[in-house]
Image: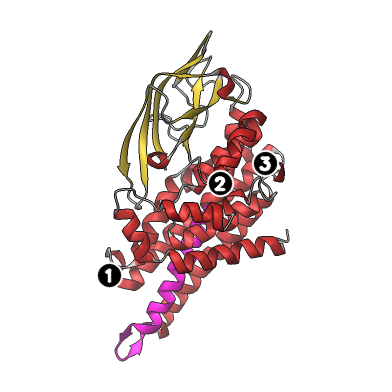
Amino acid sequence: MDFQFSEEQSMLRDTLARYLADHYDFEARRAAERSDAGWRPGCWRAFARELGMLGAGFPEALGGLGGGAPEHLIVMEQFGRHLVLEPYLSTVVLGGGALVHGSKALAEQWVPAIIGGEAIVGWAHAEPASRYCRHDVQASATRDSRGYVLSGHKSVVAGAPFATHFVVSARTSGKRRDTDGVTLYWVPRDTPGVTLREYPTIDGNRAAEVLFDQARVPASHVIGTEGQALPLIEQLSDAALVGLSAEANGAMARMLADTIDYARQRKQFGVAIGSFQVLQHRMADMAMQLEQSVALTQVAAMQATAPERERALAACAAKAQAGQAGRFIGQAAVQIHGGMGVTDELAVGHYFKRVTAIDLQFGSAEHHLGRYADLLYPAAA
């Protein structure tokens, strides 16, 4: 496969890279992480209104630029390079994607608000006991004459403290792990019965447990067909794998660059440690791991609209390699930096935390290696 960015995609990448270089250095990120808000709303508004990048992956009919998975890849990779805290994945890739593919009426109403930076979305699907099973849903939705009543517990909802709305999965029929009977809903945060328990995560981001206690949702807020949401959840989850892999690639590229720069400056026995052959070999291995991850992520982005099996295989391969590469590059970067590699003042440790967290989001490397094998050899699954 030949993956080449178009002129418009290259402009998006370069424009975003310049903005982040000017406005999102490591110290600015640390200050935002420690603030009460936990993110930078001003940057989010700039992404929407000055750069127009929140609309890059949406159809032109909804006010977007007509892009898709490659645009998400570009944005997420740049976000990874700068440890951006803003909830692009949950809002644009998952929330916006659910509306575009699941409900024309809701998309026409809310996608322009997402593009404009006004609507921020939390992806409320995982539950405390579901692990990485996409159809393990215990939250319930009961229909009556006025719509639906939701009850349940959604776990580790990334970006939830910033969200104005949630895309929520709930079971309208069947048993806990049935593949049928799951429905998606568009739920405003201020809906009575919705409460959040917010907390910081190890990588400097914010998340929350989102609890639904008899929360009432109108029938017009159903995304897709009642009880048939699993194919859409699978599609969006695979899109999230590609986005997270791209973010990991950006973070790994920064760790590699910082490690090479440090090895050129740090001296032992009167010479730069970068001249030691064993460290040159280690940094070459780091570069190879990164290149493999970048290549597999690009393939997965190109397969975003392929048939389900091919799309899932590519997404699993990308996420598994990103997880393995992130662990290898992070460990090597910290080892070459020495003890200072894990200090709070040095960026490399923060990047290592982020790629570690990425590995656990939407399934670890080990999980997706197993899923890849099951997809490749279904008879043995």
Q: Earlier in the sequence, mark 2 or mark 1?
A: 2
- Compared to residue 151, the image places residue 252 above or below, namely below
x, y percent for residue 309: 67, 39
Q: Which residues are magenta?
A: 245-273
x, y percent for residue 27: 34, 65
Circles 3 and 2: CB distance less than 8 Å?
no
Q: Amino acid at mark 2?
A: Gly
Checking the image for residue 65, the label placed there is none
x, y percent for residue 22: 46, 69
Location of the N terminus by quadrant is bottom right
Checking the image for residue 62, the label placed there is 3
Report if residue 272 lies within the magenta region.
yes
Q: Residues within 10 Å of mark 2 (few under 14, many from 20)?
A: many
- Compared to residue 87, the image places residue 349 above or below, namely below
- Compared to residue 151, the image places residue 188 above or below, namely below
x, y percent for residue 218: 53, 19
Q: Earlier in the sequence, mark 3 or mark 2?
A: 3
Residue with the mark numbered 2: 116
Residue with the mark numbered 1: 340
* Number of numbered discs overlaid on the protein picture: 3
For the point 59% across and 28% down, which residue is it? 230
Residue 29 relative to residue 146: left or right: left
Q: CA distance from mark 1 to mark 3?
A: 48 Å
Which one is in front in this view, the residue at disc 2 or the one at disc 1? 2
Element type at mark 3: helix
- Report which quarter residue 126 is drawn in: top left
Q: Amino acid at mark 1?
A: Met
Q: Residues within 10 Å of mark 3 (few under 14, many from 20)?
A: some
- Report which quarter residue 220 is drawn in: top right
